[in-house]
Amino acid sequence: MTFLQLLLVFIALSVSAGVLGWRRANDPVFLQGRRPRSRAVYHGSYMALWCALPMLIVALGWLSVEPWFIRPAVLQVLGSVAGQPVEHAAFQYLEIRNIAAGILSDANASEVIRLAVERYRSLSQSASVVFSGLFLLAGILGFYRGYQKIAVDFPARERVEKFVRFFLLASSMVAILATLGIVLALVVEALRFFKHVPLLDFLLGLQWSPQVAIRADQVGSSGAFGAIPLFAGTLLIALIAMLVAVPIGLFSAIYLAEYARPSVRTIAKPMLEILAGIPTVVYGFFAALTVAPLIVRASATVGLQASSESALAAGLVMGVMIIPFISSLSDDVINSVPTSLRFGSLAMGATRSETIKKVILPAALPGIMGAILLAVSRAIGETMIVVMAAGLASNLTANPLESVTTVTAQIVTILVGDQEFDSPKTLAAFALGLTLFCVTLVLNFIALKIVRHYEERYD
Amino acid sequence: MDTVMTTERIQSDDALVRYLPDKPKLVTLPSGADVKMTAEGVNVFYGEKQALDDISIDIHSKQITALIGPSGCGKTTFLRCLNRMNDVVDGCRITGRITMDGEDIYAPKVDVVSLRGQVGMVFQKPNPFPKSIFENVAYGPKIHGYAHGNDELEEVVVRSLNKAGLFEEVKDRLQEPATGLSGGQQQRLCIARAIAINPAVLLMDEPCSALDPIATARIEDLMWELKENFTIIIVTHSMQQASRVSQRTGFFHMGVLAETGTTEQIFQNPVDARTRDYITGRFG
Amino acid sequence: MMTSNEKQVRKRNRAEVRFRSYGVLSLLAAGSVLLFLIYTIVSSGYSAFFRATVLLDVQLNAEHMDVTPPYTQDVLMQGRYTSVVKQALYAQFPEVTDRKHRRALAKMLSPGAELVVRDYLIDHPDRIGSTVSLEVPLSSDFDQLYKDHLPRSGEHIRFTATQLQWYDRLRQEARIHYRFNTQFLFGGDSRYPELAGIGGAVVGSLYALLVCFLLAFPLGIAAATYLEEFARESRLTRIIEANINNLAAVPSVIFGLLGLAIFLNVFGLPRSTPLVGGMVLSLMTLPTIIIATRASIRAVSPGIRQAALGMGASPIQVVFHHVLPVAMPGTLTGTIIGLAQALGETAPLLMIGMVAFIADIPATPLDASAALPVQIFLWAESAERGFVEKTSAAIMVIMAFLILMNLLAVIIRSKTQSKVE
C-alpha cells in the first residue's frame, strides 16, 4: 500500500473510532440513566487513541526495517561477489534504490547491481505486504479494544489526560534527542575519519588539501588534512569582525541606553533589528559584489594588492552582521545595572561619560564579556558570508588582504554535490563539524558561567 | 428555638454602628442543626513553618459560618484546606482530618476534581475568565457534564445569574467579555459561576475586600439568600460583616482557633480573652 | 586666568562631548552601512523585474513548426518553434544572408523565444498558418545592454559592431520593448538569466516552512507547557532546559550535518526535498518557539488558574482551556519570528541537497526543489552578468517576505498589548 493510502486508512479509522466512542458514551440506552464519570468527548478520544497509537507503532517499526534489515541484506549481495570494494557501498546502495524506484534506468548496470536490485525489490515487496497487514490489524484490534473499554464509570478523562501528559513530556525530550542526534552523527563519522587520518595530524597539520583518489590507481591522490590553516582563517576573519562589531555595537548600546532621546530610539532600534534580520546570504552577496571590489581598489591606491576574495571583505561584513547582536545584549546588560549606582555617581558631580566609564561599564563588564564571547561563537559558526566572500583556498596567513578559508566554508564545500560517503574527504567535514561544535559549546558555556556568576552580585 | 433580634446586638457596641441593614434580620438557630463539614485536629505546615495548629470546628449545613481574626493568622489557609486548594502549593503539608458528610476528603481515593465540584470557591480579587459572561458561567457545568446542549446550558446560566442577582444587568450582553464589568459585577459573576455547578458548600475568601460599600452590601444580601440552598463559609477581616451575615463564627488567632460558637455569643459574650480583646478593638 | 580646576572641568567636558559623539558616530556608521546595502541591492535588482523584448512578425507555418493537425496541447508541446522565430528575425534584416552573420543575428534572441510562440499557439491554435506579431525575449547579453549593465565599448565587450548596429536599428524601429517580467516571479530556474525565475525556489521555501511549522509548533508548545506547568525541579528538567539553550546557540551548519547524516543516510529520506529541509529547520526553530511560549505562559495571571482549579478543572483542563488561549498571541509572535529566521537559513539546506538545479516548480513537499536563499546563493556564484540583477531582485523578494512576517508579529503583539490595557 502506498503512503497516501496508509495515511487515509489511519485518519479514517482513528476519526471513526473517536466518533463512535463519543456517540456510545452519549447513548442513553448504554448509560441506563446514570451520569457517566467522564464526559463523552473523553471516551471518544480514548477510543481514538487506542486505535491510532498501535498503528503509529507499527509504522515506526516499518521505517526501521529499511535501514536495519533490507540494506544489509542487499549489500551482502554486493559483497558476496569477489572484487567489490564495499567502501563505495553507500553510493551503490543509492544507485540500487534509484533503479528499483525507476528513477534510473538499469541499462548501464552491472550484473551484480541487477541482482542487488532484484533482492531489494523482493525484500521491499514482502516488507510492504507484511507491514500493511500489521498496520490494518493494529488499527482494527485497537478499535475493538477501545470500544470494549467504554463504561459508565470508566475514568476516560484521567486516562486521556495521562496520555496528554506523557506527550508533553516526550515533546520536551525532543530537545535532548536532537542534541544526542547531533553528537552521535558528528562523533561516529569523525571517528571513521580519524581511522584514515590521525587526530594529531588533523589538529596540528599545516596543510589542507582534501583530495582523495577516485580510483585506486590515480596518481597524486594523497590528500593532506591538516586543519591549522582553517583554524587560522576562521580566527582571522572572526577577529576582523569583532574589531568592527565590538566598538560600534558597544557604543551604540551605550548611547541608546544613556543618552538618546526617545525619538532617536524609535529609529535606531528598528534599524538595528533590520540589520539583525538580514539573512547571511544577503550579507555574503553584498560582501562579494560591493565590499570586496572596494577593498581591491582602495588597497591598489595605497600600493597594496588585495585578493578579490579577501579576508578583510568577509570580516568587515561579518562585523556589520554582529553589531546588532552585541548591541542588544549589551543594552540589556547596561539597563540592568541599578539606577542607584548611576545617581550616586552623578550626584558626586561626575559627567555622564565618567559615570559610564568608571561605574556602569565596570558593573556591566561581565555581562558584556559574555555578550562578546557569544558573538565570537556566532562569528566562528558563520558560513555563508565566508563561502561567498572569502574563498575556498586554504591559506595560512595573517594578512587580511589575502584570501583564506574557514572551517565552516570547508564543511559546506566538501559536502555540496555528490559525495562519496565513506571517503576521508567527506568524513573530514564531520571531523571539522565536531571541532566546531565543541568550540562553540565551550564558548557558550563559559559565556553563560561568567554572566551567571556576576549576576548574583546585583540581586 | 432561639430567636434573636440583631438590632439589640448592634446597639451594644458603638464601633459596630457603621452600617445598618434596612430591616432587622431574624436569626433562627435550629438546635441539632446538620453538620456538613468538620475539621478535627488539623495542622498545616509550609515547609518547616507551622501555619495552623490543631484546628477543630464544625460547619453547620445551610448556615453562614464566618472565620474572623487579624491578618496572617491562618484563616485563608484553613479555608483553602476545605477544597484542597492547598494541594497545589509546593511544600504544604496537612495533618488531621477534614470530613464532608462524614467522609474524609483527604482520603487517597478521593477525586480532587469532583470534590471541587462540590465545594466551590470565590476569591478575594474577582477573577473572571477572559471569556464572555456566558462562557464564564457555562464553564463549570460544561466540564462537569451537568448540561448537554446549548439549551440546557443557557438554562443553567440564566438561573445562576438570576440567583446571583446579576441577570437583569447583563441579560443584553451575555456574549460580551466579562472583563468589561465593574468590580462588584465581576464578583457577582464569580459567585454565579461558582453556584452554577450547584456545590453543596461555598467558600468565600474575603469576597468584598476589593469592593466599595454599595457593592459590598449587595453581595451580603446575596449571601443571605444563598444560605437557603448552600452552606457558606466566609473569611473576613471585617467584624461588622461577620456579625451582619453569619450565624456561626470562628475566631482565629496566630494559627490557632481561639473560640467558636454562634455569632451572637461570640460578639456578645466572648469566652476567650483573646476574642474579647479582638472584638473590642484592642488589637487586629 | 583659569585655575587648574577650571581647566580640569573644561577637559572633562571635552571628554564628555567626545564620548557622546562616539555613540552617535557608531549609530550613524551602522545606519549608513544599512542604507548603502539597501541602495546597492535595490539599484542593482529592480531591473530584473523587467526585461527587454523584441517585436517580431512570426509566420506560423505548420510545416516549419513540425506540427500536424489536430492541434491539441500534446501535439503543440512537441512542436519546434525555433526556426519560425529565427525566420521572423531574419525578415527584419533581409540584407543579412550568409550563415555566419545569421548566426550572430540569432544570438540576439533568447533560447526561450520559441516558448513564447508555443504558449501563444496553445492558447490560439486557430492562428496556425497566419502571421502574428509576438514579443519575444532578447538574449541575456542584449537584455543587459538595454539596461546599461554591459558596456558598448571597451576591452570586454560581448558584442560585435554589426550586432550593435542591428540592435540600434531595432530600437529605432521601436521594435524593442521593456516589459514587466512575470516569468521572474512565477517561472522556475533556468540556465539563461533572462528566463530564470524564483517561482520554484519560493514554493520550495514555502513548503519547507510549512513542514517546519507543522513540526515545531505543536512540539514547541507541548514542551513549553510541560516545562512551565508540570515539570518539577529535577535533574531531568535541568538537562532538558540546558539542551534547549544549547540548541539555540549551535551553528546552522551543524544542523545541516545532522540532516545529512541522519535524515538522509540513516532514515533514507529523499534528498533535496522541502520535507527534509523543513525537518532540519524545525530543529532550529524549536528553541525559539519554546522560549517565547514559556514567557507567554508565565505572563498569564495566576488568578485565572486559581479560579479554574477552584471550579474543579483538572490541571490539564486548566492549561488547555485557560492558560494556552491567553498565551497564544505571544506564542504566535515568537513562532512567526522563528519562521522568519528559518526562511533566511541557507547553509543547512545546502547540505541536505536543496541546491540542485531544478527547473520545475515542485508540486509537493516530496519533490526535489530549491529554496529561496539557496537560489540567491547559486545565482550569486554564477559568472554570468545577467544573474547579478536576478540575485539582487531575489534578495528584494526575500526581504519583502521577511518584512511582512515581522510586521505581522508586531501587529499581533500590539493588539494584545492594547487588550491588556
Image: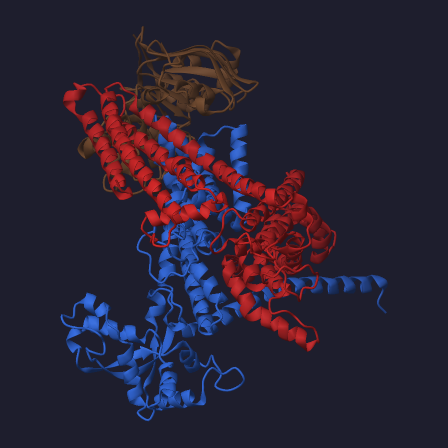
Q: Position of residue A127 (x, y in %)?
A: 31, 35
Q: Colour of chain B?
A: brown
Where does the N terminus of chain A fall, quadrant-wise?
top left
Relative height, residue B63 to residue C230 (above, below): above
Q: Position of residue A411 (x, y in %)?
A: 55, 53
* Chain drawn in red: A
Q: Position of residue C200 (x, y in %)?
A: 36, 61
Residue extending furthest toward the bottom:
C95
* Chain drawn in blue: C
Q: Residue at x 57, y 53 (%)?
A: A212
Q: Residue at x 48, y 15 (%)?
A: B94
Q: Is residue A201 left or right of residue A139?
A: right
Q: Nearer the viewer, residue C84 or A424?
A: A424
Q: Is residue A7 left or right of residue C258?
A: left
**Residue A246 appearing in the image:** no
Q: Nearer the viewer, residue B258 or C52?
A: C52
**Residue A98 appearing in the image:** yes
Q: Position of residue B29 (x, y in %)?
A: 32, 11
How many tags in the picture? Answer: 0
Relative height, residue A198 to residue B249 (above, below): below
Relative height, residue C154 to residue A98 (above, below): below
Q: Nearer the viewer, residue A337 or B263?
A: A337
Residue extending furthest toward the front:
A82
User: Quadrant of the rendered structure where residue C128 is?
Assistant: bottom left
Where does the C terminus of chain A fall, quadrant-wise?
top right
